[in-house]
Amino acid sequence: MWGEGGRFYWGRTEGEQQREVKGIAVLFAWISSQESHLKPFIDLYWSLGWSPLVCHVDFLTLFFTDKATSLARGILDELLKVSS
């Protein structure tokens, strides 16, 4: 999901209904990281029973707090949707 200041998405969703989820791991990706850089970490947390939520920050978000606030609100809203 794209938001102001970056984007976030669930790392893996296949088989989510069939398995027991132990929790959620929120992964904050470093700036200009590629999917291939994050895949080993996503797979690791997935194999341990955690659902990974991956967050990418835009470069300008570092300098504009309103963008960071908007991204943080989007991430928290997503986490609240899952918990209810």
Image (cartoon, rainbow, N blue to C red):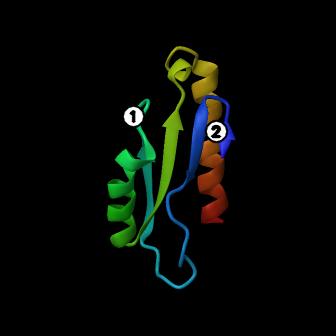
Residue type indicated by callout 1: Trp
Residue at image coords 43%, 41%: 34
- Name the mark on residue 30: 1
Query: Where 21 falls versus 79 (above or below)?
Result: below
Quarter-wise, where is residue 10 in the image? bottom right
Q: Along the horizontal axis of the image, is 39 left or right of 76?
A: left
Label 1: which secondary element = loop
Q: Nearer the viewer, residue 14 or 22?
A: 14
Label 2: which secondary element = helix
How many neighbours does mark 2 have within 10 angstroms: few (below 14), some (14-19), or many (20 or more)? Answer: some
Residue at image coords 63%, 52%: 78
Q: Nearer the viewer, residue 75 or 14?
A: 14
Residue type indicated by callout 2: Arg
- Residue ID for mark 2: 73
Query: Where 4 falls versus 40 (above or below)?
Result: above
Q: Along the horizontal axis of the image, is 27 left or right of 75?
A: left
Q: Could you tell me if residue 72 is visible in this image?
A: no
Q: Quadrant of the C terminus?
A: bottom right
Where is residue 2 drawn, in percent x and y? Answer: 66, 40
